[in-house]
Image (cartoon, helix red, strand yellow):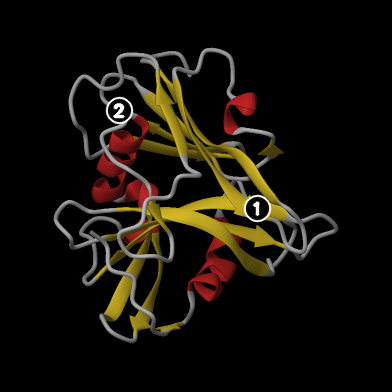
Amino acid sequence: MAIIHRTTLKPTKLELLTSWLPTRPWYAGGGEPRLEKSGGFRLDDPEGEVGIEFMVTTDVSGPEPVSYFVPLTYRGAPLDGAEHALVGTAEHGVLGPRWAYDGCHDPVLVAQLWALVEGRARAQAQSLTDTEDREVTRSCTGPGLTATEDRALVADDAEGTRLTATDGTTLRLHRALRPAPQATALLPEGATGHIGGAWQLPDGPRVHGLFAALYAGGRD
C-alpha cells in the first residue's frame, strides 16, 4: 500500500515535466508548456519500494488546452540502465532524494500496468492512502499475456507510446488525451482491452477518456 505524504517536493513534479514534455515526440505544443495538474491515479508496488503514479497534466500555453497522460515512477536510488528515461531528480520532504522516471521504462510500473488491464491490480486514488479510484475503468476480453512480464519493448511516436510484450501483446498508451462520454467510446477497432479514467479540464468540466488500448499479439 502506497502511503501519501503531505509534504514538499523540490522541484515540483510539474516543474520537472515542464522541461521534459517538449522532448517527447507526442508533445503537441509549439514551445514551453504551462502545466496544471488535472488528475490521475496510482498503482501499488507489491514490494513497497517504488512509487507508481499515472498523472494527467494539462498544458494551457496554447489556444486550446491539451491534457497528457504521464506514467511516472519515483525511486530512492537511480534505476540501472534507465538514464535515458530519467525525467529529473527532486528532494522529497520526508523520503529525501527521489529519481523520477518515465514509467514506461521502469519494470515495476510495466508489470503493474499489465496487472491492471487484466484485472489483477486495482487503481488507487492519486492523493489518498488506501483508497480505490473507482473512476478508472479496465477491460481485457482476449487472453492477455501468456505470463507475468515486467519488461516490454517501448516505442514512442507522434501518437503515443507502445509497450510490446515478448508474445506480441501490445498496450498502446494515448499520451495526448481526448475527452469522451466514456473511455470505451474511443476504443479502436481490433482492441481487446482498455484502461480509461477521468480528469479535470482547467476552468471546465470533469471529463473521461481512453488512457490505453490493448491489442492481442500482432494486431497493433
Q: Judge from the rendering whether residue 50 lies leftward or rightward of residue 131; answer left or right.
A: left
Q: Residues within 10 Å of mark 1 (few under 14, many from 20)?
A: many
Of 197 and 170, nearer the camera is 197
Of 183 and 25, nearer the camera is 183
Instruction: Please provide percent x and percent y for residue 62.
Output: 80, 60
- Comparing marks 1 and 2, which lies closer to the viewer? 1
Quarter of the rendering containing residue 120: top left
Asked which secondary structure carries label 1, the reply is: strand
Q: Judge from the rendering whether residue 22 lies leftward or rightward of residue 4; answer left or right.
A: right
Q: Are marks 1 and 2 in contact (CB under 8 Å)?
A: no
Give the amino acid type for the residue marked by disc 1 in the picture: Ser
Give the amino acid type for the residue marked by disc 2 in the picture: Ala
Of 205 and 214, nearer the camera is 205
Question: Which residue is tagged 2?
Answer: 165
| In the depicted structure, whether residue 22 falls above or below residue 189 | below
| In the depicted structure, whether residue 215 falls above or below residue 1 | above
Query: Marks 1 and 2, how far apart in space?
Result: 27 Å
Instruction: Please provide percent x and percent y for residue 48.
Output: 17, 60
Query: As drawn, which residue projects farthest toward the left?
Result: 47
Instruction: Please provide percent x and percent y for residue 53.
Output: 39, 57
Q: Judge from the rendering whether residue 107 lies leftward or rightward of residue 116; answer left or right.
A: left
Q: Specify whether residue 73 is in view.
A: yes
Question: Which residue is tagged 1?
Answer: 67
| Residue occupying the point 28% across, 80% down | 97
Q: Tell me, for residue 192, which label it has, or none.
A: none
Instruction: Please provide percent x and percent y for residue 155.
Output: 44, 37
Of 22 and 15, nearer the camera is 15
Asked which secondary structure carries label 2, the reply is: loop
Which circle's residue, 1 or 2, is located before the other in the chain?
1
| Residue occupying the point 24% across, 67% down | 78
Quarter of the rendering containing residue 180: top right
